[in-house]
Amino acid sequence: MLSACGAEVPAAPVATTAAPIATQTAPSKNPRRFVPGQAIVKFKGSDRALTDAELPPVRGFRAQLVQPLSSGAVVVSLEAEARSAATSIAEEEARTLEAIAELRRNPDVEYAHENLYMEFFATPTDPLYSQQWNYPAINLPTAWNSVTGNVKIAVLDSGRLDHPDLSGAWTTGYDFGQGDADPYD
């Protein structure tokens, strides 16, 4: 747009090698990965899983029972009635979310949500994790499947507050042994 100002813009230099083209977008910090075309649905007043014949219609989708769950909810397959042969995963995910929104509008539905992928026994990306004997000893990897943040821990030792792995992870505490807020012995 500099040409509109009357100044000539020199041509951009031509690169001799092409820069790599990104073929994927960077994953979000905490993506909700789910099975496209499936939802977990629980109907109000139902302590048992429904059968295919009892599933209510979902406008624009063919709903079919995949699996009953012990909670009384069911895993439902949701296939769009107007489906083209070539669809991307993103389109399938968008259609699934659309079907779930339609299910949630049904007054007989207690809840409807994505059939999320779960990673059992996920471990941190710390390259030295394999040298940590203490985490598996207290079965911590199993707990990480439920909670991975917002946990406060009381440390009953003065420890090394200046350790680089712990920098910025401290909160003001209380020294119950000496009755003050100074954690040092």
Image (cartoon, rainbow, N blue to C red):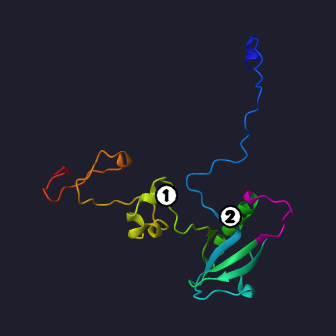
* Crowd around label 2: few <14 · some 14–19 · many ≥20 (10 Å): some
Query: How far from the left and from the top, in percent, is residue 72?
Result: 59, 84
Could you say which quadrant of the image residue 52 lies in?
bottom right
Q: Is residue 121 magenta?
A: no
- Label 1 element class: loop
Q: Which tag, 2 or 1, sits closer to the chain's start?
A: 2
Q: Is residue 54 above or below residue 2?
A: below
Instruction: Residue at 38%, 60% (x, y): give it.
Output: 151
Q: Circle 1 is placed at which residue position?
A: 124
Identify the main secondary structure in magenta: loop
* Crowd around label 1: few <14 · some 14–19 · many ≥20 (10 Å): few
Residue 149 shows in the view: no
Q: Nearer the viewer, mark 2 or mark 1?
A: 1
Instruction: Residue at 14%, 59% (x, y): give it.
Output: 177
> In the image, what residue type sits under mark 1?
Pro
Instruction: Residue at 41%, 60% (x, y): give it.
Output: 132
Q: Is residue 42 above or below residue 157?
A: below
Name the outermost residue toward the front.
Answer: 131
- Label 2 element class: helix
**Left or right of 72 in this view: 143:** left
Residue 106 vs residue 172, the one in the foreground: 172
Could you say which quadrant of the image residue 42 lies in?
bottom right
Q: Circle 2 is placed at which residue position?
A: 97
Query: How far from the left and from the top, in percent, is residue 22?
Result: 71, 42
Quadrant of the rendering where the N terminus is positioned? top right
Q: Which region of the structure is painted magenta?
A: 79-90
Residue 109 vs residue 115, the one in the foreground: 115
**Left or right of 129 in this view: 168:** left
Q: Is residue 108 above or below residue 90?
A: below
> In the image, what residue type sits under mark 2?
Leu
Q: CA distance from mark 2 to mark 1?
A: 30 Å
Query: How far from the left and from the top, in percent, is residue 131?
Result: 43, 58
